[in-house]
């Protein structure tokens, strides 16, 4: 690297816990529990050239055993030391350093990684999607999760429509007969031609899943997401070819997980997360691997707020092979009772739009300014 293009180094890594509250009418109830508040954290990285980057740890204890408190603990006691003094690029080398210093904790590492990418973008004046090899698009169609049944589902759907959503997935994975009845109601509410999939979050047995797929066939689910356990790749393969595309989510955290799904011929599509993969460049690597083997890719969600959703969107825009038929789940900010980001992401319920500015292009909540430590 010539002296004319010095790479700044990391001088500080700080973290603040951040717990946005979900709007009561949009609380998600699935086979993996109730999501009514998000135990997240925000990470702030400062660099030697003055650039400052932010990233969101979009953690949920039931997914990976992480929350905002565990993220704050590990950033302050382990990850900070692994990063301070290191050159900001290549970011993938910093991801490797985090892996050598701390096992697991992918959502925590992903939040730090997003802050590093944001800082690199601000330092270079470029959007993160460009640094990741894009952008192949500047808008991404999105959908929202619906849950519950009867009047609760009707109210949930009405609240989603009021926020501009027209594409949905229903949380299923409980009793297959009840799930099919709720799916029929969701189809009636959404409309005959609306995009509507279903997500079982590992909740069905193979027999339950086969029954639910048969019972919902007349209501034409656009996809079935993670019908059986994450490691039941044989079960997933058995459930393919029944008229509904099979999408894996919990089965794939790492590139290695995705390679196993590909080898087992276990899916038609994969839901790639920034959080599960542990970093933006790793999410992009998963999307490229999926495309190389003919799987569709969508960007999946743990109900990210604005900074987390921005990281998802930059990845989505860097993926040439992003699915053109299944909307992504980059709608997290719309679930919250309040949007507190100083500069929020541009989402209208139908699509999320890539910001023009450098880095991730959104700014963290002003109320957290004094909380980073
Ligand atoms: Mg899912």
Image: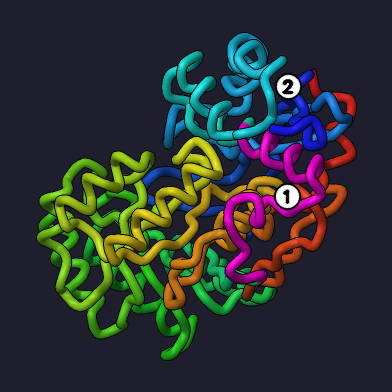
Quadrant in the picture for residue 196: bottom left
Q: Residue at x 62, y 58 (%)?
A: 313
Q: Residue at x 67, y 53 (%)?
A: 310
What secondary structure is the magenta-colored segment mainly? helix
Q: Provide residue 319's location: percent of width, then percent of height.
A: 51, 61
Which segment did they paint magenta? 113-138
Q: Provide residue 119's location: percent of width, then percent of height.
A: 75, 37
Q: Nearer the viewer, residue 322 or 154?
A: 322
Q: Provide residue 290's location: percent of width, then percent of height.
A: 34, 58
Regarding residue 178, the answer to whether it shows in the image is no
Position of 141 with respect to 169 (left or right) is: right
Q: Nearer the viewer, residue 198 or 109?
A: 109
Q: Nearer the viewer, residue 176 or 225?
A: 225
Tell me the SS state at disc 1: loop
In the picture of the structure, the residue carrying the numbered disc 2 is: 13
Regarding residue 236, the answer to whether it shows in the image is yes
* Residue 346 position (above or below residue 271): below
* Residue 175 position (above or below residue 324): above
Q: Is mark 2 within 8 Å of ligand 1?
A: no
Q: Provide residue 52's location: percent of width, then percent of height.
A: 82, 34
In three-dimensional space, the C-alpha distance between marks 2 and 1, rounded to whole angstroms, equals 17 Å
Q: Residue at x 41, y 62 (%)?
A: 297
Q: Specify the quadrant that holds the C terminus.
A: top right
Q: Residues within 10 Å of mark 1 (few under 14, many from 20)?
A: many
| Image colouring | rainbow
In the picture of the structure, the residue carrying the numbered disc 1 is: 360
Q: Is residue 83 in the magenta section?
A: no
Position of 61 with respect to 18 (left or right) is: left
* Residue 338 position (above or below residue 68): below
Quadrant in the picture for residue 68: top right
């Amino acid at each position: 690297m010539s002296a004319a293009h010095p790479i700044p180094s990391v001088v500080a890594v700080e973290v603040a816990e951040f717990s946005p509250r979900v709007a009561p009418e949009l609380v998600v109830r699935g086979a993996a529990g109730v999501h009514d508040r998000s135990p997240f954290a925000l990470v702030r990285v400062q660099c030697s050239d003055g650039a400052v980057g932010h990233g969101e740890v979009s953690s949920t204890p039931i997914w990976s055993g992480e929350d905002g408190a565990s993220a704050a603990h590990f950033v302050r006691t382990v990850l900070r030391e692994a990063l301070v003094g290191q050159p900001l690029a290549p970011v993938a080398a910093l991801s490797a350093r985090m892996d050598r210093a701390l096992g697991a904790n992918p959502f925590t590492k992903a939040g730090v990684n997003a802050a590093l990418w944001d800082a690199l973008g601000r330092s270079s004046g470029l959007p993160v999607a460009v640094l990741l090899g894009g952008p192949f698009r500047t808008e991404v169609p999105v959908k929202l999760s619906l849950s519950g049944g009867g009047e609760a589902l009707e109210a949930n759907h009405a609240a989603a429509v009021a926020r501009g959503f027209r594409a949905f997935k229903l949380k299923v994975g409980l009793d297959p007969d009840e799930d099919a009845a709720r799916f029929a109601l969701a189809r009636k509410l959404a409309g005959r031609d609306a995009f509507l999939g279903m997500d079982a979050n590992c909740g069905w047995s193979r027999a339950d899943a086969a029954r639910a797929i048969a019972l919902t066939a007349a209501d034409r689910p656009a996809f079935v997401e993670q019908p059986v356990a994450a490691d039941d790749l044989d079960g997933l393969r058995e459930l393919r070819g029944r008229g509904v595309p099979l999408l894996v989510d919990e089965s794939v955290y790492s590139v290695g997980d995705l390679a196993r799904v590909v080898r087992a011929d276990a899916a038609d599509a994969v839901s790639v997360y920034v959080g599960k993969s542990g970093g933006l460049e790793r999410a992009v690597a998963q999307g490229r691997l999926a495309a190389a083997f003919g799987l569709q890719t969508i960007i999946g969600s743990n109900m990210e707020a604005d900074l987390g959703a921005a990281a998802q969107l930059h990845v989505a825009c860097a993926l040439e092979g992003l699915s053109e038929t299944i909307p992504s789940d980059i709608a997290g900010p719309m679930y919250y009772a309040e949007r507190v980001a100083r500069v929020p992401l541009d989402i209208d319920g139908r699509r999320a739009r890539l910001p023009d500015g450098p880095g991730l292009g959104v700014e963290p909540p002003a109320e957290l300014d004094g909380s980073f430590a």
